[in-house]
Image (spheres, rainbow, N blue to C red):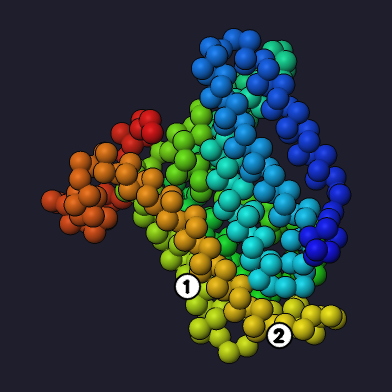
């Protein structure tokens, strides 16, 4: 029981999350005054998902999970799944953007809007926004971050430097996770720009990357990659066995997010393409005069409302 009750953290990140929740509730209250009851109920359901995502984020970084991640590689892999996958899924589904914007009073809200739309830096900021919110940037950056941080030299650096661990490793996993899931899950006022077929390909390719990582850490390895986990006082599990368990978690838990997400986007693709055979043909680039460019997001796809 002490594994669960001991070693909780109470750092300033709790205050940040509390401030975000408070701002979100203020925004919801202001929106409630100008919305229909049905829309207010829908916003409340999305708010619960958003708070669930924040709760998973707190669970990953404030609970004993974060403490034991310093001793056990497999616990660290659980932490990464929470930060990069499950918390972003709920946060994106929760669509907190409009309520958070309405947390500001009318005057400051208009000033912020004018800055982003009419300010001297607005064109540059909009260009950066278009790039970072593009499907290919989200897919590539998420997978690159996930792979690169598991290189032994960078992983060990993060384990020995808390600033790198929290702000660079965890921060990049979380931010790119948000960007990735924005391409899959509608998050008002943003809708996925990519087609359902592209989304299915993104989910499959990301899951394949996780499988390859898991195999590299287990089947294709004969020793632990990470010296930082060797000879830790009080740890009886061997570093290599620990690494193999972590690889199994990446392998198995990958299906927990990939399969449900794939079911949703395949249904979405069938609705758009007309049949499962058309979807498979497009994925295989065999539909008529199809080319690999068929998987590229189109302008028409940007108008999907799913």
Residue ID for mark 2: 238
Residue ID for mark 1: 212
Quarter holding residue 124: top right
Q: Is residue 208 left or right of residue 34?
A: left
Q: Residues within 10 Å of mark 1 (few under 14, many from 20)?
A: some
User: Is residue 124 at all visible to an observer of this figure?
Assistant: no
In-front residue for pair 112/218: 218
Name the spot of residue 220 as percent of width and height, x first: 51, 84
Quarter holding residue 103: top right
- The residue shown at (56%, 22%) is 41
- The residue shown at (67%, 48%) is 56
- The residue shown at (67%, 15%) is 30
Whole-number angstrom distance, CA of label 2 to CA of label 1: 23 Å
Q: From what the image shows, is residue 91 above or below residue 8?
A: above
- Outermost residue on the front side: it is 1
Name the spot of residue 153 as percent of width and height, x first: 68, 75
Quarter holding residue 196: top left
């Amino acid at each position: 029981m002490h594994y669960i009750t001991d070693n909780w953290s109470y750092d300033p990140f709790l205050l940040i999350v509390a401030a975000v929740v408070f701002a979100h509730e203020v925004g919801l209250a202001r929106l409630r005054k100008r919305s229909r009851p049905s829309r207010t109920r829908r916003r409340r359901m999305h708010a619960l998902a958003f708070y669930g995502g924040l709760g998973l984020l707190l669970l990953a970084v404030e609970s004993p999970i974060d403490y034991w991640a310093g001793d056990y590689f497999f616990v660290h892999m659980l932490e990464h799944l929470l930060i990069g996958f499950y918390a972003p899924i709920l946060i994106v589904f929760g669509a907190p953007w409009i309520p958070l914007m309405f947390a500001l009073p009318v005057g400051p809200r208009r000033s912020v809007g004018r800055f982003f739309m009419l300010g001297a830096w607005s064109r540059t900021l909009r260009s950066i926004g278009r790039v970072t919110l593009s499907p290919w940037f989200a897919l590539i950056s998420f997978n690159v971050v996930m792979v690169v941080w598991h290189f032994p030299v960078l992983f060990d650096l993060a384990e020995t430097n808390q600033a790198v661990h929290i702000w660079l490793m965890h921060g990049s996993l979380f931010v790119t996770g948000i960007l990735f899931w924005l391409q899959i899950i509608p998050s008002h006022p943003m809708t996925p720009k990519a087609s359902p077929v592209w989304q299915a390909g993104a989910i499959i390719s990301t899951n394949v990357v996780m499988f390859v990582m898991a195999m590299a850490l287990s089947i294709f390895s004969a020793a632990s990659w990470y010296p930082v986990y060797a000879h830790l006082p009080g740890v009886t599990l061997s570093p290599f066995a620990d690494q193999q368990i972590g690889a199994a978690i990446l392998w198995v838990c990958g299906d927990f997010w990939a399969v449900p997400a794939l079911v949703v986007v395949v249904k979405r693709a069938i609705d758009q393409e007309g049949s499962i055979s058309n979807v498979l043909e497009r994925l295989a680039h065999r539909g008529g005069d199809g080319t690999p460019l068929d998987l590229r997001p189109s302008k028409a796809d940007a108008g999907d409302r799913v």
